[in-house]
Amino acid sequence: MKQNPGRRPSFKYANAVVAAIVTFSAMAGHHVRAAESTLVYCSEGSPGGFDPAQYTTGTDFTANTFTVYNRLVEFERGGTKVEPGLAQSWDVSPDGKTYTFHLRHGVKFQTTAFFKPTREFNADDVVFTFDRMLDPNNAFRKAYPVSFPYFTDMGLDKLIAKVEKVDPYTVKFTLNEPNAPFIQNVAMEFASILSAQYADQLLKAGKAADINQYPVGTGPFIFKSYTKDATIRFDGNPDYWKPGAVKLSKLIFSITPDASVRVQKLKRDECQVMSYPRPADIGPLKSSADIDVPSQPGFNLGYLAYNFERKPFDKVEVRKALDMAINKKAILESVYQGAGQAATAPMPPTQWSYDPGLEASSYDPANAKALLTRAGLPNGFEMTLWAMPVQRPYNPNARLMAEMIQADWAKIGVKAKIVTYEWGEYIKRAHAGEQDSMLIGFTGDNGDPDNWLGTLLGCDSVHGNNFAHWCYKPFDDLVQRGRAATDLNARTKIYTQAQQIFAQQLPFSPIANSTVYQPARKSVVDMRIEPLGYVRFDGVSVK
């Protein structure tokens, strides 16, 4: 990721400007703001930045997507159903290759310390947003050259032939072939609509990289300031186009990587909502009279990926041996502590087309050792095992899990060195393929099976979310067929076949599907668990 820090205003200067205009911002707009109320969210980590198209994690999306931005279509709060967003309606051609979006009128981009729009949202903003991802010669992309992992992981750079402005409030997408999950895909975070006018201002000033530090959107909250590893501050958007959706005047992210500290802050009412409690903290939190701890089965998967581009992990015998040597039952008991179930497939049981017939290999160190011998490694080998530095819904304690796997592998002669990095660096280096193996996971983004099989294992996703760097043509052909099919039964059969190939080749070891908890103070009203893995504060209030 290339940036131009020498030409970006300092955060110190930006914060001073922000402070000077707080009073003005509070009075801006024609809507009457709800009574002054502040919600503090104890989040687990710092976002990589505020340009959603660049990122892939829930930590990033909670901070940069569902605060500042909107998309053409959006997932309903607390669910996976798609509803109108910045597009009030859309049409699909009979051949399934043309989508025409009819845009909402009267939507305002946010007025901030660094940008004051002179027009409302229109088709130019949609065309700019997608053209930046589609066209390598786009002027803004050339000025600020970054990758768009989700967009390319799902093959949208190859799928979308063109995006055209029909009139100021109509945009037409032409696809190269029918694509069953297209509407779900453009509801995802990477498709957040940017201001073309703001981008043009940055481009002319030679500060294109600022789009990742000083975001402007149409969303429910206005970015005010960010201090890395400390706080992010937002104001409620008084001009938000959804009447009554903004019930907070101020939203503050208190970045708190230590889960035990997050719990203490929640108990002391220093924050009203927290992310990712440890399983051991669930009981004590539930016993608190002032805290609610709702939960639901997670739409997620925690797994251990083997880097197919590095030897000896290109050998299926080695991958299966490593998998067979892991005592997953012990991991479920020690790491998840009853808040998870053993995973066998590359998607959770709550995803349609899930194959319940797949069976995990049993814990069998003796057979694992025999498989290594068959692969020409009777004395084992040395490798790296990466452990995430943060809690995620799919893995509440990656360090402990890594230590348990390290001990299991030592029994078959495999010496694993545990490696970790800061979260943003962890993901960046993993995309580059520096790991031998890594603990990672995924929470579904759009409710479609392609989001698991294509995003995590497709050839288009290598060096993106395919952390196994595995490209296997028989599997990938099925993924492509599944995208083009429109009949649900036909797609289910295709995805079942793909899951069976996965089980045969085992590019990663499924570990667990976890239960998701969302602790909040009882003063918080209408906080919902989002099955797609992020946290939203539109519609939320504090009494």
Image: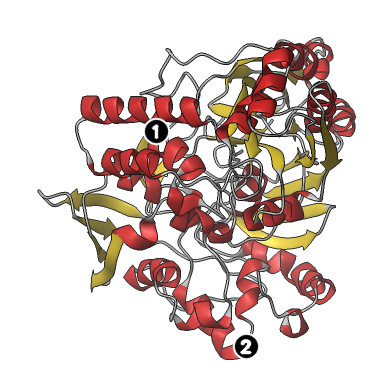
> Amino acid under label 2?
Gly
Q: CA distance from mark 1 to mark 2?
A: 41 Å
Q: Which mark is residue 449?
A: 1
- Nearer-N-terminus badge (1/2): 2
Relative horizontal placement of residue 4, taking residue 285 as reference (left or right): left
Instruction: Residue 415: name its quadrant.
Output: top right
Q: In this view of the protein, which residue sits in the foreground, 222 or 254?
A: 254
Instruction: Residue 414: name its quadrant.
Output: top right
Residue found 56% across the figure and 16% down from its top: 360
In the rendered image of this protein, does residue 49 appear above or below residue 35? Answer: below
Instruction: Pick the quarter of the image with the C terminus.
Output: top right
Asked whether residue 105 appears in the rendered view, the answer is no
In the rendered image of this protein, does residue 84 appear above or below residue 217? Answer: above
Q: In this view of the protein, which residue sits in the foreground, 266 or 60?
A: 60
Relative horizontal placement of residue 341, taking residue 478 as reference (left or right): right
Instruction: Pick the quarter of the image with the N terminus.
Output: bottom right
Label 1 CA crowd tier, 10 Å (few <14, some 14–19, many 20+):
many
Q: Which mark is residue 497?
A: none
The secondary element bearing badge 2 is classed as loop
x, y percentage for residue 193? Answer: 45, 61
The secondary element bearing badge 1 is classed as loop
In the rendered image of this protein, does residue 513 appear above or below residue 75? Answer: above
Relative horizontal placement of residue 128, taking residue 526 as reference (left or right): left
x, y percentage for residue 410? Answer: 84, 26
Color theme of the render: secondary structure
Residue found 22% across the figure and 28% down from its top: 490
Residue under label 2, please give it: 206
x, y percentage for residue 297? Answer: 56, 18
